Structure formats: structure tokens, C-alpha cells
Image (cartoon, rainbow, N blue to C red):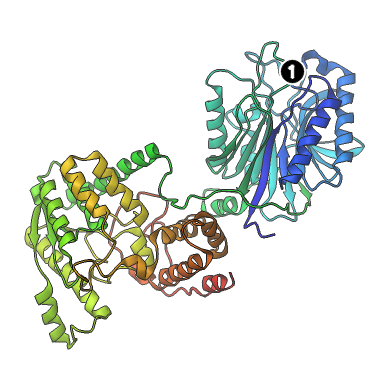
Amino acid sequence: MNHDGFFRIAAATPEIRVADCEYNKNSVLNLMHECESRGVGAVAFPELCLTGYTCGDLFRDHTLIAGAERALSELLEQTANMNLMALVGLPVACGAQLYNCAAVLCRGKLLGLVPKRNIPDYSEFYESRHFTPGPDYAETRLCGQNVPLGSLVFCCETIPGLTVGAEICEDLWVPSPPSERLAQAGASVLFNLSASDEMIGKASYRRNLVKIQSGRLLCAYAYADAGAGESTTDLVFTGHNIIAENGTVLNESKQFSSGLTAADVDLQRISQERLRMTTWHNSGGIHTVPFSMEEPRFQVERKFSAHPFVPDDQADLAERCEMILNMQAWGLKKRLAHTHCKHAVIGVSGGLDSTLALLVTVRAFDMQHLSRSGILAVTMPGFGTTGRTRSNAQRLAEFLGAEFREIPIWESVSLHFRDIGHSSALRDVTYENAQARERTQVLMDLANQCGGLVIGTGDLSELALGWATYNGDHMSMYGVNCSIPKTLVRHLVHHAAVTGPEGLRTVLEDVLATHVSPELLPPENGEIAQKTEAIVGPYELHDFFLYYMLRFGFPPSKIYRMAVASFSDSYDAAAVKKWMKEFYRRFFMSQFKRSCLPDGPKVGSVTLSPRGDFRMPSDASARLWMDEIDRL
């Protein structure tokens, strides 16, 4: 099966009885069978789950230690034909030492034992009374098998990108967790076998700890916590299982529960992130244990936001919008200060992009304590301008306190057509681009007159598609929207509407309700005739393609399947494929436009600045990507 690098893992909390190894083994076995039926490939159980964490001085008793080994032997035998890696906690005697271990087993083989390195002896913990910190590496014999014991990583030879590491409870809570070395030794999936007792406020701290560690180590991190059945003599255990990947919590159990918490982790994304970051360095020094298993059969259940640039949570979205507007304005403020400019010139069309640029410019002038009258907002009606957009441009400029000027371009463009011998009846690319270039010339000359800067309005999505006239709206002296995708532009304008005064809100709501269009072709019955998304495709699809291509380096086939799942209610597979092909064609064809972009602020993780995040030859071929799309 083609899972596009996704692999299902789980953290499990069995219901146990303290010191009843047979009962505990059966509880673990039942959950392993459930893992197999649900397509889980690797699962971790809690710390010391075969005996119970709260055995106290019973850990000194040979009967308990032998019972745990016998339970593990039976577990190995009963799962010999199971296509599952499992990490199970138990005490292991090795010479004169007793270790708190994670036993790693797969298909009846005991692959290794990972001992706890950091033994807590404070507050409610007194583990050093029974256990010894684990060594870097040793060998021992357990359950009739010779096994390595120590810091180990388990590398799967049959599933690309799957390398597993483990640490135990307190190991994560120390300043330098073992998982750091394990990740740098190649571990992409890290498990923590834990018996973390509950206290007020601890759950959120634990969640943040797991989330942050997965982000720092660019890995999947699964935390399996003890729960029902542990002794409540002095402590309560609530079975708080957490699975995170690259700084995002994928799934989390309800507290005071038991059972499986599963998630589909993206091994390909983890690999790509590590390749992308030049500060990520692999290191050796840790023993690697090879193993093999078949790729589990499962239907990928992971959900992908259809709008990855836009947070789903409304409070997060509002906070992000405010931050982005300030970042855009702060960048422009610095440019104004550096160039000693007290004037800015901006072409306002009544559309989304120029509206956002004007809002940002006003904010920057306020930050710089400059008079808003130094902002010259120019509307330049052409052959496709409608009364609605022209009116919105004027209302917006006047409400914001900018100087407004109307300079029609019909006559100058018509004269230009005459000069170059072009018929104005021919509605071709020359007809359209001549208007865009004339507008840019007007803006540049006005900026020279007042000693100001031309503020660019083009957004990230347009730059990706090359939907800009070269040396027309493509050019400015500072492009405030250059790293804002179209799907986010709409939310930024909406944020300004709902947080602004009533008069501003009215104008902005009408701008938001207007079709996206360059308005270069004559209107039909007074309405916009040229609708951008009917020509280049839906921006929400293009932004989805752009994000996963640039941010993670995913291939078209994977992005396609993700998009089909994410947009199932909006577009069928044929439409996704059609517009994906258009996206890649335009993206590769238009690099020459991006190679000479003006300056502009980076506000997110995806940008196309030739001086910053993205460098590509203008003549790069799209053949590999297009061939892959054709094979879909």
C-alpha cells in the first residue's frame, strides 16, 4: 500500500493489577491485538506495566522479577506472528543491578532492552531504592534470548524512515534527555514509557513538554502513561497519553481513561525537515539494532487543513492577523525611515490586495508618526474598471485619511497601442499588460514627484503562479504583501473590518464580497467579466499545493492525495489534478519573475524571495513533476 510515508503508532494504557504479572500480560496482549486490527505498526505501553509501577519494595522480591520475565516470555511467544513492534515496561535483573526497562519486541524476537537513565529520588519518588541508572551499552540474556541493553535505536530495514528510540518517564523531564542523542542517531519515532502521577496543572505541562520535544528533535514523540490499576495509596495515575509530531499534538487521550491512543505520523515529513535544516546533525555513538516488519495495512486517517496558512481556531487566527499586520507595517516603517521618505504612493483598485497594502501603509505611517496625508492613493480606471471597485477605492482612501487621486489610463494606453501598431479591438495579452505597465509608470512618476516610495500590492499566491505583469504590477519599491498568500489576505482584510470603526467595516465588507480580478477586460453589464480563479484556478487549491511543496518538499503524488482528502466536499479528484498541473506549469514557468522581485517582509514559513528562502534557476524544467502528475 502507498501510505505516502505515513505510519500509525500508538500509546497504550492497559488496566492492570499491582504485582499480578499474568493479568497485566493479558491486558497488554489484548491491546496489542487491537493495535494489529487497527493497522498500528508500533505501540508503547507504560513504565513497568507488567508488574505495576507502584510495587514499592516488592521490586526486591525474586518472585516478582521472575514473574515479569515469565510474562514477557509468554508475550513474545503469543505475538510471534504479529506484525507489530511493541515497547513494554518491566524490571530486569542484570548481575547485581536491577534496571527499569523498556523491552522492545517484534514478531517474537526481543530486539533489545532500553533502561531508564535518570532515576528520580525527590518528592513522591524514591526509585533509587530499587533501580540503578542504565548503562550506555551492555549485553544480557532474558527470556532465552541474548539481547543488547542500553542506549539503542531500532532501524527498520523494510519501512523507509522508520527508526525507533525509547526513553522512560523522568528521562524526558531532565535538562538533557536521552531522546536528544537518540534523535541525532537517527530515531524518527520516539516513545516514552511513563508512570507520571497526576497533580493539578501537571497535564498541561506534560503536554507542552511532549509537544516541544517533538519540535526540537524533528520527530514523532509518543508518551504512554500509567493509569487504571496502579495503587492509589498516595498517588493517582490518569493514563494521559500524548502523540506529537514536529511541535504539533496529533492525538491525546482523555484523562482517567485506558486503552489506545493512535495517530498517523509522517515519516517523510520528519525526514524532509531534517534535510532542510542545516543545523541538524546526525551523530553516531549509539548501538543500532536492525529489524524487519511488513508495512501495516491501514487507511490514513490523518486530517490536513484545507487552508494551511489559516489557523482553524478563531482566537489564534485573530492573534495571527494582528501580528502579521504589525510585521508588514514594521517592515515598511523601517524602509520609510531609512530612505527618509514621508510619502508613499499606492495604486488602489478596490480589490483585496491593494486594500490590504493601503491598510498596512496607514499603520506604518502611524508607527512612524507621519501624517496620513503623505499617502497618495491612486486609482487608475482602465478598460475593465467597474464603478463598484472604483467607488470602494475612493471610499477607503478617504476614510483612512489618505490623499486620493483618479488618473484614467484609457487615453494613454490607446495612444500607446497606436504607437506600437496594436489594435485595441484585439483583447490579447498586450491589451491587458499595457494597462498594468501604464499604471506602474504612473505610480513611479508620481513617487518621483513627491519623493516617495511606490508600495507593491502583489501577494504570495500571485507570485507563485506568475500572475503579475512583468515590470507592471510585478514591480514596486517595497512589496508589503509579498509573503501573504491569497487565502490569508482575505482574513487579514476581514480582521481589519471587524476590529475597525463602522464606516471602515462597511467598505471592507464590500471589498471582501467582490470577485478577485485584475479588471483588464471590459465589464459585462457593468459587472466584472474577468474572474481570476476561472482562469488560473482556485486560490485555495494553489495555496495548498504551494504550502506542502515549499514547506515540506512533498512530491505531487502525495500532495494530490492529501488535497483530494482535504477538499472532498469542494472538488473532485479530476479538478484537483487539473489545477495541480496548472499550478506546477505556472510555478516553473514564472521563476524569472521572482528572480528580480523588490524587497518585502517575510512573515511566515513559506516565501519566494530570491534573497531569502527560495532560490531556483529561472530555466529549471518541470518535467519530473509534470510526469508524476500525469501518472496519477
Nearer to the camera, 555 or 379: 379
Whether residue 100 is visible to the viewer of this picture, yes or no, is yes
Seen at 86% across and 21% down, the residue is 64
Q: Quadrant of the C terminus?
A: bottom right
Q: Is residue 309 left or right of residue 426?
A: right
Give coordinates of residue 36: x percent, y percent. 76, 45
Nearer to the camera, 502 or 300: 502
Up the image or down, 72 lies above or below 276; here it is above
Seen at 58% across and 38% down, the residue is 251
Nearer to the camera, 250 or 218: 250
Up the image or down, 421 lies above or below 385; here it is below
Q: Residue furthest right?
A: 144
Amino acid marked by disc 1: Thr
Seen at 79% across and 35% down, the residue is 30
Q: Is residue 512 left or right of residue 90?
A: left
Q: How many marks?
A: 1
In terms of secondary structure, where does tag 1 sit?
loop
Reading the image, the residue beneath label 1 is: 54
Q: Is residue 234 left or right of residue 530?
A: right
Seen at 73% across and 54% down, the residue is 295
Give coordinates of residue 152: x percent, y percent. 73, 40
Give coordinates of residue 453: x percent, y percent. 16, 57
Whether residue 93 is visible to the viewer of this picture, yes or no, is no
Up the image or down, 22 lies above or below 404; here it is above
Q: Residue furthest front?
A: 525
Give coordinates of residue 423: x percent, y percent. 18, 86
Q: Quadrant of residue 259?
A: top right
